[in-house]
Image (tube, rainbow, N blue to C red):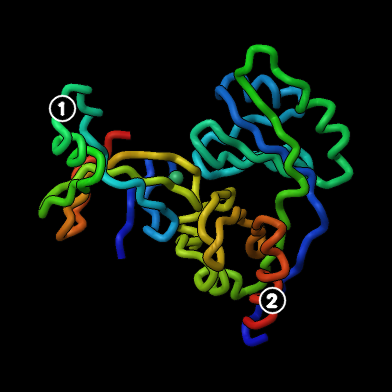
Amino acid sequence: MLTLPCPFCGERDETEFVNGGPTKPPRPDITVTNSEWIDWLTVPINPIGYVEEKWWHAKGCGAWFTIKRHTVTHDIAKLDG
Amino acid sequence: MGYQISTERQALQATFDIKGVKAAVARKLSPLGLALPSDRNTTSRSNDITLCWIGKSHWLLVAPAEMETQLKASLVPDDTTHDCRVVLVSDVFTFFSITGPQANDIMAIASPLDTRPKKFPENGSTFSELFGIRGLILRQPNGFTIAIEQSYADMVAAYFRKI
Ligand SMILES: [Zn+2]
């Protein structure tokens, strides 16, 4: 069972949350190549290791927050509000 | 019913959704003699009014239905500074009481939230998952009050009949 640290409610069960996907790097400049644009737009960030991702406490307080979660161990390394 | 509990669908409650800057919300509620709860996910009370702190800048005020007109007059006129917004949402929620010696056991079935006294205080109030949907949980002296969106009320009542 995964629990997630909501900045308002504290540690809560994962079933209260909706995953908002990995945080993306900033939108690239208009001068990028087609393949760089497609990479940014469609290729999910999916490392074996820590991924920075957004979560929504949909069934709780409604807060959006960002954490770093290890995709293999589910260890949560960082909460930045 | 195998559990030593009593569940009851409650009459309509006057319910107001309050969002805004903490200081502005405090000012708005002070004429009611109501202080903001000091801890997150807890309540404060004044007479028959319960104020739940449910999100960073979000509160829910619950009172008996007969107080709705008076409370609406006091709370709903817009704050011209846009620091505090109050919306009447009495029709959104249906409240149920769950009381009795095994009320905690029912909450353990309904919700992933740990509602034992050590984790969920006497004045606790929070949104969590209830039977798979979003709902408000409030501790009461002999159990809990829950509030869910009213379109799910018959479904939740049916679950209680099966418990
Ligand atoms: Zn939360």
Would you call the spot at circle 1 few (<14 residues within 10 Å), some (14-19), or many (20 or more)?
few
Residue at (72% x, 38% y) in the render: B16
Ligand 1 positioned in quadrant: top left
Q: Which residue is mark 1?
A: A32
Of the 4 image quadrants, the one containing the C terminus of chain B is bottom right
Give, as a three-letter code, the residue at label 1: Val
Residue A68 pos. (x, y %): 21, 44
Residue at (66% x, 26% y) in the render: B85
Residue B25 pos. (x, y %): 63, 24
Residue B73, above or below A40: above
Residue at (30% x, 60% y) in the render: A2
Helix, strand or loop status at disc 2? helix
Residue B144 pos. (x, y %): 63, 61
Q: Label 1 vs label 2: CA separation?
A: 57 Å
Q: Is B163 in front, or is A15? A: A15
Residue B32 pos. (x, y %): 76, 28
Pointer 2 chain: B
Q: Is residue B94 visible?
A: yes
Q: Is residue A36 left or right of residue B3?
A: left
Q: Is B19 in front, or is B42? A: B19
Q: Is residue B126 left or right of residue A25?
A: right
Would you call the spot at circle 2 few (<14 residues within 10 Å), some (14-19), or many (20 or more)?
few
* Outermost residue, top side: B81
Q: Which residue is mark 2?
A: B158
Question: How many marks overall?
Answer: 2
